[in-house]
Image (cartoon, rainbow, N blue to C red):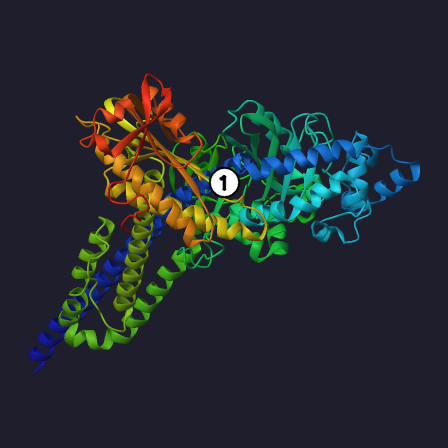
Amino acid sequence: MSSRSSLRSRLSRPLVGLGLVSVVLLAAVNFVVVRTLLDTGSEDQLTTLRDVRRNAIDSGIDRLLDRVAVMGADPGVARALIALDDGYEASASELTPAQIEQLEATYAPVVQVYDDAGVERPPVADLLPASDAGRSVQLAYIADNPYPPEERSELADAGDGSSYSAAHAQYHGFLHDLAETIGANDLLLVSAGSTEVVYSVEKRIDLGTDVQTGPYEDTSLGAAARELERSSVSDSVIVDAAFYLPDASVPLLHVAATVRDQTEVVGAIVIEISIENLTAIVTADGQFDLLGLGDTGDAYVVGADGRFRSVPRAWTEDPEGYVERYLDVGGDERTASLMEFTGGPVLLQEVDNDPVQTAAEGDDYLGIARNALDRRARIAAGPVEIAGLDWIVVTEQQTSETRGELEGFLWSTLILLAILLPILAIVGAALARVFARPVRPLLRSARAIADGDFDTEVPELGRNELGDLGRQLENIAERLREQDRSAADEEARINEMLASVLPAALVERVRRGERDITELVDTATVIAVTIAGIPEPSGAEQDEVLDLTQRLSDDMDALAAQHDVERIRAASDHQLFVAGRNEEAAFAPAALAFALDAVGCVRAVGADFGIVLSVQAGLATGLVVSGVLGTRQISFGMWGEPVDRAIALSDRGGAGVLVDGSVVDLLDDADAVTAVDEEVAGDSATYRAEDTVGAEREPER
């Protein structure tokens, strides 16, 4: 009996030990797996998010530059600037001392905040416009404006009977709408002759000042004007964020483009963009949960000087707590007071850590470091080089958040061990196998996801710690799948944008990095189409005109595809196409058929909108050269004598289709054309093409 009891004792100890060791080992394995999954998932999330936000900033700035460049080329903007500039010069009159005193009084709300905060600022006398015209316009639209400062843009006509007020009343609504569509804080028009701000939507105190010699020449407004002088007239420029006194000293981006009246430069358009717009781009409008950043994650932009360019999440959620934390980690009290004065740490607080320094040198960073408030965080950073801004995008998540989840898992495991110890004496080995079994498929799923297979199936492990882990892993995979879809959508959008300005055959070559693409084409046929009668896009009819021009563009593109014709250039009233590019034949019959259908198409579209559109098409055949130009702003063009002849024929009066002798020689049916007169285009006589099916036919759609 004693011997049997001793044997049971010796057997029970190894069984209990085996069970205990098995469970401890299982817990250790689970701990390592969870830590690896959390760390890997967090790193993948931050890296992917950094790259997605970098692309979002890149495309967002590109769209902004393109839209401002289009505004600079808008004939309506040019007409507005010319009319306002003429009225501005005519409004010049010397103000009385009482009027100057009245004008200076309107500056008090702007400069008072500086005095209250103890910030040095220029005297009010130095901020006044130097010219009589600038002071007169400020008196009428700022000092005598019946609306409060934040609503001054509501005044369309000062009612003084001046030519400036007449021009302002005519164009203010149009310019106000332009500023709203682009999300601008303000829209300024600068005269090329006087270099003065002759118009402002919001009527702030920079109205009437000289951008080259006035009180704001050393601000981002003056920098934008100087940068514009060094750029091509068709390009737009952007200046890095800076504090701007007329707009309550908030950080602003200034974007500018030259305004042209045909070939003459008449001035510049300057758009003021709030830094809040950049913050919205980098944070997806503050949807941190959607970005997978949890409770402590953040995404922000840092400038080349190491200071914030977008508002960090911690400031948005708790400004007072942010300032206290900043001071607790050794921040400068003066900087803290300026944060409260300007409403954030943008342009004030320097982010001095390894991630930012590494990204500033042009390399991507991923690792654990101290963030701007000296909290330990996993950080991904990388450079964003666009338009000379040299920004850095940073995504981060505090390690305490992932470590908290890991500690929770550890405590759950320890509690489970304490409960199971009595049972381990009997079924230790079996329990080890039970706990170890589900780890393998979970690890396989984790490895597959880490290798990029985001569609791998994660096993359902029930309502326990491993089940929670599996569901977390599935959530991570779902987020990564969504990011992959977003990246694919972005790729498709880029291809669509390129396809709108390039022939389909060149899109892939441009995507590969080719920029200087030229092609020599033998005997291609050029079709130039000139449309007259399109109303000017202004006022209440602007939407209808835009619908008309979009309908014309879509129908002409469809018609070109139907006839195997390529679009080379598309404006609202002048369009250029080519047939036979990179082909052995010039495709003159197809080009003529397209031109005849195009005339009918334009007339039909005009009839649908209740507008009589006159359309003239010109065709010429010969040697042409085509190619892609530009690096950041890409354009496609075609040159050669056939281009000039076709355009000349399309610009002649009348309506219909005119061809020269080079086209007639290649037609299958010479009866389809008749000579017009003895005038020539180049070396070829001019002929009018007749549609043998019907001159008024409408193309298939």
Quadrant of the image containing the N terminus: bottom left
x then y, percent, for residue 267: 62, 30
* Viewer can see residue 527: yes
Up-down relation of residue 493 to residue 577 (above or below): below
Taking the spot 65% from the left edge, 44% from the top edge, the residue there is 171
What amino acid does circle 1 point to?
Answer: Arg
x then y, percent, for residue 486: 33, 51
Looking at this view, is 438 or 194 the one in front? 194
Taking the spot 82% from the left edge, 34% from the top edge, the residue there is 123
Looking at this view, is 19 or 211 the one in front? 211
Hey, which residue is sitting farthest top in the picture?
Answer: 683
x then y, percent, for residue 679: 38, 21
> Callout 1 environment at 10 Å: few (<14), some (14 to 19), or many (20+)?
some
Up-down relation of residue 682 to residue 65 (above or below): above
For disc 1, the marked residue is 67
Q: Secondary structure at mark 1?
A: helix
Number of marks in picture? 1
Hey, which residue is sitting farthest bottom in the picture?
Answer: 1
Looking at this view, is 469 or 19 the one in front? 469
Q: Is residue 261 left or right of residue 62?
A: right
Looking at this view, is 373 or 275 the one in front? 275
x then y, percent, for residue 197: 69, 34
* Viewer can see residue 380: no
- The answer to which image quadrant residue 349 occupies is top right
Taking the spot 31% from the left edge, 37% from the top edge, the residue there is 595
Q: Is residue 176 left or right of residue 100?
A: left
Taking the spot 37% from the left edge, 61% from the top edge, the residue there is 405
Up-down relation of residue 147 to residue 238 (above or below): below
